[in-house]
Image (cartoon, rainbow, N blue to C red):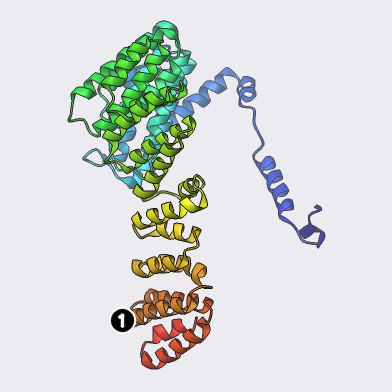
Amino acid sequence: MSCDCPYALDGHNCKHMAAVLYDWEQNATHPVIDNSKLVKEASEEDVRLFLVQVLDDNPSLVETFKQYTQNEFSLDTMIDDLEGVCNSYSDGYHYIDYEYSCDFCEYFEEAVFKWLDLLKEKRQYSLAFKFLLKAYDILDKLDIDDNEGETYELSFSIINACSNIIVCMEESERIDAFDLLKQFLGNTRNNYDRVDILQVFFNSLKSEDFLKLQLDFVKEQLDYIDSHNDILDREYVLDDFAKMYLNLLKKNNVSNQEINVAYKKYWKCDSIRMDCVFTCINNKEYDKALDYIDKCIDLDYENQTLMKRDIELKKDIYKKQGNTEAYREELKNLILFFNDTNIDNYIELRSHYNDKDWITERDSLIEQLTPGRFLCEILETEQLYGQLFDVILGSNNRDLLHQYTHVLNDEYPEKLLQLYREIVEKQAESTGSRQHYRQIVEDLRIMKSINGGDEVVDEIIKKWKVQYKNRSAMLDELNRV
């Protein structure tokens, strides 16, 4: 055997040769068999005798074979099979521990799709749909300590299988399935699951005949949630259903007046407010959009993320309108009032001033900003290194000091070394773990990168080796500087 890879050309047996030999051995010892041809060539008597022997050796296959050879399937039998899987993995209190959750989900899924395949072969789609909903219900009500999200994945695979079954149904069967789905969702414990399940099914029921049914059902759900304050995470669930309801209104081609009624009724839902705002923006009704955004701000003032989004929307609209003064004001608001503002907004604001006016505006912003990372970023951008050093000095923030040491090195090496020296001297006063000493060593290494730092660090280490001669761990780490 030969190969043209470099390893083989040097006279060795390579991995490519090994792979070929392994494949040859597998084909020689486990040849591919055409099962259909094998059964066809066997006599009917041999097939029957072999099948009896297989069923005797595998009692679990008896019920499957029985169901397969009959035209009618028993829902109770299939459910009993699933509950048998649950019982085999649960303790005496019907609880499944996380150690067994992966294996349980694997066998539960195998049992579900074993029956589903049989039902699909017999084209019994309505029964398959009922069975899958029941399988989901069993899993939903199971007391199981999930390991890595496998129960959610299994639940969702069952729901996806349901939606695939609906596609195969006749129109009359789909209407019955939808009625069954509504009844099923009424018993679902988790409202988030309801939203996910409905989205999957609505994607499968796209014909116009179902749009009105979907709209009416979602409206019922929405009215129920809106009138019950005891629902878990009610605000988020209400928002999801309101968004679904609005989308269905549009798909049903209702009038703008009906859309506006929905906006007004569910204005407290963020997704509804944003739909209204973006509809105005897309229609270039900018003044109306600004009015709506101001109403959003009245509701969002306690939520920094939503407030920032609202102000960014206002900023973008003012830019579209060419309103430079208002645009600059919103940029200032983003810079002054939000902790996660990035430097791009600051640079954008600077581009809308001439050099003379900008200095006054810049100094006013710097004076109003809270000392911290963002202010340091601005001071670096403006090359105001003296102020930058003062902010870092007053912050007592080791991370900021590390971040800007290289920026300040050329201008303030002596001040930096003195600041670092005070920090490491303070740290060295107390004993600690190896990690404590490694932090000190990290600062000493940074000091060595500062102009004139080598001599200062050597002096400190020399002093410490005398002063802290009994700290073996500290001395060991210092040797790594």
- Total numbered circles: 1
Secondary element at tag 1: loop
Q: Residue at x 61, y 26 (%)?
A: 35
Q: Nearer the viewer, residue 77 or 289?
A: 289
Return the residue at label 1: 430
Q: Position of residue 53 (x, y in %)?
A: 48, 28
| 322 horizontally vs 108: left or right | right
Residue 63 seen in the figure: no
* Residue at x 30%, y 43% (from the top left corner): 145
Q: Is residue 61 above or below residue 406?
A: above
**Measured along the vertical axis of the image, is residue 367 above or below residue 287?**
below
Q: Residue furthest bottom?
A: 466
What is the crowding at mark 1: few (fewer than 14 residues within 10 Å), some, or many (at least 20)?
Answer: few
Q: Is residue 451 visible?
A: yes
Q: Residue at x 38, y 38 (%)?
A: 311
At which x and y percent is residue 376? 43, 60
Residue 243: x percent and y percent?
35, 24
Q: Residue at x 51, y 24 (%)?
A: 49
